[in-house]
Every structure is written in structure tokens, then in C-alpha cells.
Image: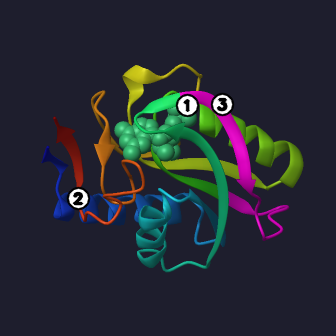
Amino acid sequence: MRINTLIGEENIKSRVKELADEIQKDSNGEEVVLIAILKGSVFFATELAKQMSSPVIMDFIKVSSYSGTQSTGKISFKLDLSENVENKNVIIVEDIVDTGRTLTYLKDYILINKHPKSLKICTLLDKKERREFELNPDYVGFDIPDKFVIGYGLDYDEKYRNLPYIGYIEQ
Ligand code: 5GP
């Protein structure tokens, strides 16, 4: 098994900085709540937060929809937010949008139950050609082809999250 690089470390770093600048500009320096979806987007969310100088609150939510490399098609809720985000500018931070199922579910859940002032989506990676749900992230780091990717938070059976770059497995 070989791991090929799809997006290198330096490339990710500079794109994350650009996204952080864009988010700050759009929120006029107001406080934002970054909601990282456990576990995959923690690496991206913390790097994004570190590049922002306006006030940032971090929170976490956990759902699961994947096992191995195939989507199970079901979403189960594992951990709810710990912060009250009512009337706050909320950004859901995701590692990758694939079919769009997870974020469609989470977006509705937060809008209906948590009443934020605004709700946006920021994803590091977007696999647009796999989309099954109509979902357009507000901020996208990179559009990528339909490959199963690992690294920078993304796992294959819980391994490879700690790779500092995005790669794909060649069998
Ligand atoms: P969606 O609900 O959009 O179909 O899938 C989103 C979730 O599926 C992501 O948060 C991620 O956990 C998982 N996923 C989708 N594509 C990939 C991939 O290429 N690699 C890995 N490691 N996970 C993926």
C-alpha cells in the first residue's frame, strides 16, 4: 500500500490562512463560534482558529456516518454542543463534504434547535461530484476529485489522521 500526496502541507497552510482572513472579513471582526465535527475536522478547525485574530469560541459535535471507506447512509448522533450558540455567528467546520448528508442533517439540527444569528459552513475539502444532497458550503479550501483521502484529520479506520498533508491510498 502506497500513500500519494494530493495536497501538500505548505499548500494547506496558506489556504487555511486565506480562509481565516475571508471569514474574519465577512464577520466584520465580530465573535464567531467554530463548531468542529469530531473527529476529522479538529485538525483543520484548530489551525483555522489560530489564524484568526477576532474572538473565536470553539465547540464540538459528533455524528458518524462512515465505516471503512463506504458510507453507511445513516447518521447517528454521538455528542451535542456544550455552548449556547443562540444569536451567535456560527460556522460549522468540516474536513470534507462528500454526499452532503452529514452537513444537511447538522445544519438543520442547529438551525431548528440552537437558533444561531447566522450559520455558515466551512470545509477544507469538497468532493462535488459525489453530492447527493443540495448543499453549498460558504467556504471551501480545495475542490478534490472522487478519491478516498486521508491525512490532516481524515482517517482510514482511525489511522493516518496525523499525516500533515492530504493523501490518497494506492492499493
Ligand atoms: P457526507 O455526509 O458528506 O457524505 O460525508 C462526510 C463525512 O464522510 C466526512 O466528515 C468524512 O468523515 C467522511 N468522508 C467522506 N469522504 C471521505 C474521504 O475521502 N476520506 C475520509 N477519510 N473520510 C471521508
Q: Count residues near mark 2 (Cα–Cα under 10 Å), then give few for <14, some for 14-19, many for 20+.
A: many
Residue 20 lies left or right of residue 165; in this view the side is: right
Disc 2 Cβ-to-ligand 1 distance below 8 Å: no
Task: Give the quadrant of the N terminus.
Answer: top left
Residue 100, label in figure? 1
On the image, which quarter does residue 146 sit in?
top left
Question: Of helix, strand and loop, which one carries label 2?
Answer: loop
* Residue type at the position of mark 2: Tyr
Nearest the eye: 83 or 122? 83
Residue 83, label in figure? none
Residue displayed at 51% across by 30% down: 71
Q: Estimate the x, y position of residue 24 in percent, counting from the top left.
A: 51, 66
Q: Estimate the x, y position of residue 25 in percent, counting from the top left.
A: 50, 62
* Residue type at the position of mark 3: Lys
Is residue 31 rendered magenta in the image? Answer: no
Residue 162 lies left or right of residue 95; in this view the side is: left
Task: Give the quadrant of the C terminus.
Answer: top left
Q: Magenta span covers which residues?
A: 72-90
* Residue type at the position of mark 1: Gly
Identify the mark nearer the N-term, 2 or 1. Answer: 1
Disc 1 Cβ-to-ligand 1 distance below 8 Å: yes
The CA distance from mark 2 to mark 3 is 29 Å
Identify the mark nearer the N-term, 3 or 1. Answer: 3
Q: Estimate the x, y position of residue 4 in percent, counting from the top left.
A: 12, 46
The CA distance from mark 2 to mark 1 is 23 Å
Nearest the eye: 8 or 136? 8
Is residue 88 rendered magenta in the image? Answer: yes
